[in-house]
Image (cartoon, grey):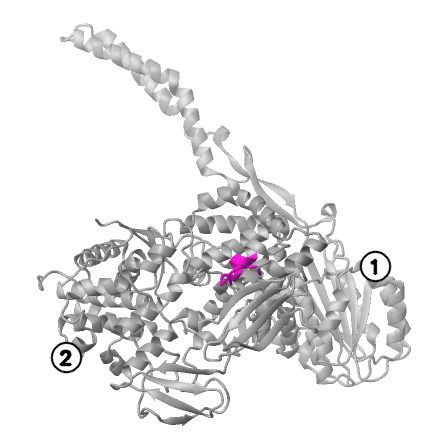
Amino acid sequence: MNKTKKPISTGSEWTFDLIQLYEHEIGNIAKDFGLNTFPNQIEIISAEQMMDAYSSVGMPVGYNHWSFGKQFLQTHQSYKRGRMGLAYEIVINSNPCISYLMEENSITMQALVIAHACYGHNSFFKNNYLFQTWTSPSAIIDYLVFAKNYVARCEEIHGVSAVEKIIDSCHALQNFGVDRYKRPLPISAVEEEKLQQERELQRQQQINLLWKTIPQTEREQSKEKQPGFPSEPEENILYFVEKHAPLLEPWQREIIRIVRKLAQYFYPQRQTQVMNEGWATFWHYTIINELYDRGLVTDSFMLEFIDSHSSVVRQPDFDDPYYSGINPYALGFAIYKDLRRICERPTDEDKKWFPEYAGSDWLTTLHFAMKNFKDESFILQFLSPQVIRNFKLFSIHDSETDPFYLIDSIHNKSGYQKIRQLLSEQYNLSINEPNIQVINVDLHGNRELLLRHIRTDNRPLAADTTLTLKHLYRLWGFPVRLESRFRSTTVEVLQIPSGNTTLDTNSPST
Amino acid sequence: MQNSYVIDRRLNGKNKSAVNRRRFMERYNKRIKKSVSDAIERRSITDVERGEDISIPAEDIVEPFFHHGEGGNRSFVNAGNKEFTEGDRVKKPPSGNGGGAGTGKPSNQGEGEDDFSFHISSNEFLEYLFEDLELPNLVRKELGKLEEISYRQAGFTSSGVPSKLNIIRSMKNAHARKIAMTSSLRKKLKQLQSELFQLQKSLENHQDDTKIKHLKEEIDSIKSRIKKTPFLDDLDLRFNRFEPVATPTNAAVMFCLMDVSGSMTQETKDIAKRFYLLLYLFLKRNYEKIEIVFIRHHTSAKEVDEQEFFNSRETGGTIVSSALLMAKDIIKKKFSPSAWNIYIAQASDGDNWNDDSPLCAELLTQSLLPIIQHFSYIEITEGDHQALWDHYLQVQREHPQLFSMKHIHSVSDIYPVFRQLFQKKGVG
């Protein structure tokens, strides 16, 4: 391209015209690189509005709850202390794809964010298989509006505090309100509203059926024969409660459903953190450099860009006071960038490790990598020895009984495989989150709900597990028991209500 | 296909989180209130009207969820290896988490043990401070009796003083009048002018001179008549009209009475000061206009400014009635009870000339209590009550609505006592 071309702008101030010009050029470059996106809706907002957006999980509309207020206060506090990092952008997986640009940003930052969010994240949302199968970007905004209105209506009828209690309990269990393997039906606000009433009636009938009192004698006989309920363990605890908790009112079930649906909606984002941020970072890096190569931006623009970019992909060492684990932006960016190198300039090592990608067309390969994986499989497939060396990754084994850590493996030949596998597991939500399932309901006795926790690596549950169980108890309405098992021996049993538990779960303690 | 659009949302509301924030505050209401009353105890006097950092213990604010705890056998990956090689053994940091090579997944470990802290504004601070409090006998004076009159513009009038002249209105009228008064003349003028024009056209050689001359004369006379129409007439003048409006008086006067005799230590004065401050802040939130009168006394009373009130020190005996008398005088001179809500707060260590105490009680019941909204007395002493207390007790029995008294030992007693003094009936 023409290096002598006139740059789009020279100052650091932005205007609406400039944003549109940059957006246009960035869009052109993105098209040249084959990025396939939803239409973009770019919204300019103030810092205060950004804080609002931050504290409502980035969603433009949401039901009201104190926990969002807590988050707002937290955001506000750290913003005031100047501690807030990377509050440059928020992007919403919707169609059109909504991105927020903050008015305080310079034109360089606006361009970076447009490339990062409007083309990077946007194309990821549209093309990654998890998002394609599990989310419905065209329906989400309408569904959020439906949810907000429904919750508000419930508050009018049943009182804010009654609704708040249910939402508290649902939030405690929302990570256990997702189907990990079954594909859910796409959500639609219109459908939801239409079906909502039908569902109320129907649900109550099913529950009545399940809890129908059986004559005494028959019950005695059937006790032996009848299979347990549920017949298969259920991983989606909220779903189970919504469908089968005996005492819930229809509106309470609907609220459980809302929290569950939203948790499900965000589940793919939680599974693709490294991939998604890495992808967006890779593209803002590539696109802005391309802008420079085409002579569309100035040297001072590039200096500011490089400064921001390098703080985004900074990876502190483990002994650095700022270390807080591996930076997903840095890791994802490094993997994609190295994958491009492997395609374009493969070494012998690459040919051995990535025979099918070394020397292939880099754009095709990167798109393939973006579309068909989630973090755990992405790392398992694409984390190269080169990246392991660059990050100086090493693994530590922590055994409860040993006063020492054991250094398992480091960035050397014998360590690459092991590190790859361990890091992949680190991003595997089903290993990362405790494996807890509904095993049984005591249909004929005290209706106790039995959960089973299967321990991985003998890792126990955290100390506040009983608090979460109390929330489950509130929803279920009858005793709740959790058995923690390691290698098919029960190691720990928690029970709510226990001897000294007050039946009142009206937290907080104030 | 390019399909992007940019929207300016900056003018949209920015307080989307307000509802959620309020919900949060309501949920932790008790905790915030406690922080506020702790702060009042701690703060220096000039410093009451300011926001406050509220801190809530982490365990009270936790949102629990199922997650892993410490322990088990697991491996995790970290970045930035320097000298480790495979098989090295590294001593674990002393206690659980927080170590450099510690937990690899901080996101899984909750938010740490830090207390949750946030800031409330000065307004919110005062709201919490005064929640549930209500001034006793908070009587808004009846509208009719009010002296306070304000003027509000109410249309226009045709007479008034020059300073109230509304020029635009007046000129508008004048213009209209001129148009109306001259319309027939102008019509005639037009007609004559066209006649003259026709005539001049048809009679190129000006034969019929006389007719033209006549017409011209007539035109001139009409023109001068139009000119003579007055530019501005008395009739045109319009004046802004103002109407007196009675507004309810929202004014209060607060009398601070304090014993500054030798027996009052700096510490007791300090306690008294805080009490006055609270009272002042509280009145400020209920009345638009507040006057404060400071009266200090030993054997005689004196009206002073705030600086002197709190800072100077006298020696000698105590005659409380001198201050009461002075308050009575000042009310009579400056603060008509029909226009002012009057509050008196007195602080003392209980010392009084023995013969004076009955006189004080009499002054109160006879002269002061009938005209004021409330009298509060705080006695700050470690020792036993003296005669004054007993006489005041008697007054309180007779006028429980108007008169309240409390015994204060230390700074931390102020706020609870203040609350008790002004507690809404039926709350707490």
List x then y, in percent, for residue A500. Answer: 70, 74
Residue drawn at (74%, 84%) of the image: B314
| Label ID, residue B370 | 1
Q: Quadrant of residue B376?
A: bottom right
The stretch drawn in magenta includes residue A145: no
Residue B345 in the image: state x and y as whole percent: 75, 69
- Is-magenta flag for residue A233? yes
The kind of residue on which mark 1 rests is: Pro
Asked if the residue at tag 1 contacts the one at tag 2, i.e. Cβ–Cβ closer than 8 Å, the answer is no
The quadrant where residue B272 appears: bottom right
Image coordinates of residue A393 in percent, x first then y, are 31, 83
Majority secondary structure of magenta residues: loop
Query: Mark 2 and mark 1: span between their CA atoms?
Result: 103 Å
Q: Is residue A392 left or right of residue A265?
A: left
Q: Determine the residue located farthest toward the top in the rendered image.
A: B208
The C terminus of chain A is located in which quarter?
bottom right
Residue under mark 2: which chain is it in? A
The residue segment tinted magenta is A228-241
Residue B105 position in % (x across, y down): 42, 77
Amino acid beneath label 2: Asp
For disc 2, the marked residue is: A348
Number of on-image labels: 2
Q: Residues within 10 Å of mark 2 (few under 14, many from 20)?
A: few
**Circles 2 and 1 on the same subunit:** no
Looking at the image, which residue is at 22% across and 12% down? B197
Q: Is residue A52 left or right of residue A37?
A: right
Q: Residue at x 25, y 78 (%)?
A: A387
